[in-house]
Amino acid sequence: MSYIPNLVEARALLAKYNREKFHIQHGETVAGVMGWFAAKHDPENEEFWRVVGMLHDIDYELYPQEHCVKGEEIMRNEDIDERVIHSTLSHGYGLTGTPYKPENVMEKILYAVDELTGLIWAVSLLRPSKSVSDLELSSVKKKFKANNFAAGCSRDAIRQGAQMLGWELDELISETILAMRTLPAE
């Protein structure tokens, strides 16, 4: 019988398939950002949003070339509920081989913030504070336009995510900065 893991279980599952600190930290960051957005858009399901954020890249470290394809296999082998599988894998729609399209607000936010959190983090490391606490929208927008900066962060995915949500890009970036400010300083 499939199940929806709680956040502690999701963290353990992520660590089971990922050893590099970067991948673990990215899962924690996206989980935290998803929790922040859930508090605004779907507070009664905040833990579910966090779990989805934690598990979205469960396969990336081991199978970067088969990202989202192997994630489905891993989660099915772990007996994870279909709702979690669909939601986590939808962040790779059009970018990987996943057939799962972002359908609801949560999935669209995940699609948008996955790449954006990486870009914001990279921009924050350039600041004297090395923090998002004093990061401004204008700094992120400037680096957003520089395609050679944090080149692994897909600007197209970020734009498409904002478009899916019906949000202006500035709104998405600003909200994600605010969300990241609530996370532990790591």
Image (cartoon, rainbow, N blue to C red):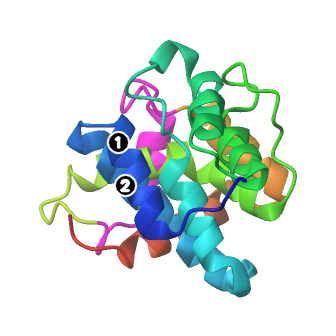
Q: Quadrant of residue 9?
A: bottom left
**Image point (64%, 62%), residue name:** 4
Q: Are marks 1 and 2 in contact (CB under 8 Å)?
A: yes
Q: Is residue 110 above or below residue 35?
A: above
| Residue that numbered label 1 is attached to | 16
Position above or below: 174 against 80: below
Q: Is residue 38 left or right of residue 105?
A: left
Q: Which residue lies at the image location 48% right of the left edge and 73% below the top edge?
A: 179
| Image position, residue 124 (x, y; %) | 28, 56
x, y (%) of residue 51?
Answer: 55, 62
Question: Whole-percent x and y of residue 23?
Answer: 33, 41
Q: Is residue 156 left or right of residue 12?
A: right
The residue most toward the left is 128
Task: State which region is magenta.
Answer: 132-153
Rendered residue at 40%/67% (across/down): 136
Q: Secondary structure at mark 1?
A: helix
Residue for badge 2: 12
The amino acid beneath tag 2 is Ala
Indicate whether residue 126 is drawn in magenta: no
Between the C-alphas of marks 1 and 2, the distance is: 6 Å
The crowd level at tag 2 (other Cα within 10 Å; few <14, some 14-19, many 20+) is some
Residues 23 and 174: in front is 23
143 falls in the magenta region:
yes
Number of numbered markers? 2
